[in-house]
Image (cartoon, helix red, strand yellow):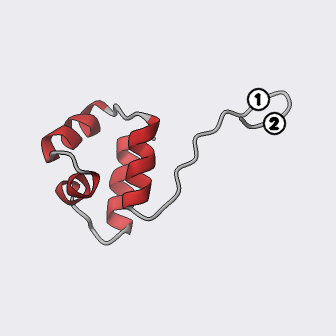
Amino acid sequence: MALSEKIRILLVKRGNISEAELARRLGISPQNLNNKMKRDNFTEKDLQKIAEALDCTFNALFTLNDTGETL
């Protein structure tokens, strides 16, 4: 599932928050957020800010397939 889809699900789960409201909480323009959503183009910093704005935790992990170790 694309990150933009996951963000849209979070917006619904957090009380039908609009993308425009999320953009306001992030301090960016709605058009800028819309462009990121269309392209599914987020930095890890963007995702951390989105998680903070939606009162959740973002975890980015790499897991080694042979050992199960996560980084």
Mark 1, residue position: 64
For the C terminus, which image quadrant? top right
> Can you give x and y, in whole percent of width and height, for residue 44 in the image?
46, 37
Residue at the farthest bottom position: 15
Label 2 element class: loop
Snapshot quadrant of residue 68: top right
Amino acid at pointer 1: Leu
What residue do we see at 76% from left, 29% from top?
A: 64
SS category of the residue bearing label 1:
loop
Q: Which mark is residue 8?
A: none
Q: Position of residue 48 (x, y in %)?
A: 45, 47
Is 61 left or right of 2, judged from the image as shown? Answer: right
- 30 vs 38: above or below: below
Q: Amino acid at mark 2?
A: Gly
- Contact, CB < 8 Å: mark 1 with mark 2? yes
Q: Position of residue 25 (x, y in %)?
A: 26, 58
Q: Residues within 10 Å of mark 1 (few under 14, many from 20)?
A: few
Residue that badge 2 annotates: 68
Q: Residue at x 22, y 54 (%)?
A: 19
Q: Is residue 1 left or right of residue 38?
A: right
How far apart are the two marked residues, 1 and 2, measured between alpha carbons? Answer: 5 Å
